[in-house]
Amino acid sequence: MTHDLSFWSLITNASLIVQLVMSGLLVISLGSWWVIVKKHMVLSSAKRAADQFEDDFWSGIDLASLYARINRQKEPVGGMEAIFLAGFQEFLRLRSQPTADADSVVSGAQRAMHAAGSRELDDLEMYLSLLATAGSTSPYIGLFGTVWGIMNAFRSLGLAQQATLAQVAPGISEALVATAMGLFAAIPAVIFFNRYAHEVDRLGNRYETFMEEFSNILQRQSYSLRRNYPDSARTTAQS
């Protein structure tokens, strides 16, 4: 008696539980690749936007002009632009207050930038947990299908009057397909999770560096408050 040991026949001839495991692994693999492609597009766009904004920011353009230009954009603002917009907007708002001092103005702008930066990092990290989950659970799901298939193969072997390798080989082969599918789903998920997590960390470091440099610029600009707003006038306003 001969058995068809092609890949497709091993799947179609597997038991119901093993087929369910394979179907689940296929869904996990497709979902992982969807996240992989989507995150590649998102992170590539974020890096290009950061490069473009840094070129504009350090080109010597007036900050008020850059702020006005970003505000006029119809597209949603993200990345460094969102951080700059939040920080400079808070800086202008606090500087317009009569009782404002340089330290409070800069501190307020820094808090606004850190809040905006946290939101941007949350957006960049979105769906990465799905890759981590797929990478860590897929091998065990495949192993469960393999164990179940081998159990069925040996159960059938025990009921046979004459046990031969040809009788048990198809059952073991179809069970091992579940392990192969589990690895097929897990390996790309782990590789791209590590890669994207590293890229998110690098973007986060770039955002932090920009916030520090921009804070220094705002600190220098805020000194004009002390010259334009004497301590005697500040005391009168506070009283």
Image: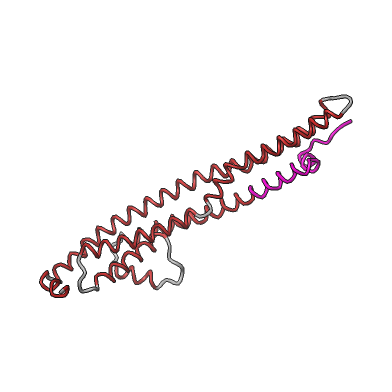
* Above/below status of 47 relative to 132: below
Q: Is residue 17 above or below residue 98?
A: above
Front one among 46 and 227: 227
Q: Which residue does the image show at 25% across and 62% down from the upper left?
A: 106
Q: Is residue 96 left or right of residue 2?
A: left
Furthest toward the left, the residue is 232
Could you tell whether 168 is left or right of 124 in the image?
right
Q: Nearer the viewer, residue 226 or 220?
A: 226
Residue 157 located within the stretch drawn in magenta: no
Q: How many marks?
A: 0
Residue closer to the observer: 91 or 99 = 99
Q: Residue 224: image x %, image y %?
A: 17, 67
Quarter of the view holding residue 118 = bottom left
- Image color mode: secondary structure
Residue 237 position, x and y percent, is 16, 75
Where residue 141 sits, quadrant-wise, is top right
Which segment is the magenta one?
1-28
Picture residue at 75% right of the left edge, 43% below the top: 17
Quadrant of the snapshot with the N terminus: top right
Write the residue at 39% across / 52% down: 204
Say if the magenta span includes residue 25.
yes
Q: Is residue 229 left or right of residue 13?
A: left
Which quarter of the image is occupied by the C terminus? Answer: bottom left
Residue 66's image quarter?
bottom left
Please provide percent x and percent y for residue 108.
Answer: 29, 63
Q: Is residue 231 above or below residue 23?
A: below
Q: Position of residue 63 (x, y in %)?
A: 29, 67
Q: Which secondary structure is most common in the magenta stretch?
A: helix
Task: Say which residue appears at 83% left-offset and 32% top-offset.
Answer: 156
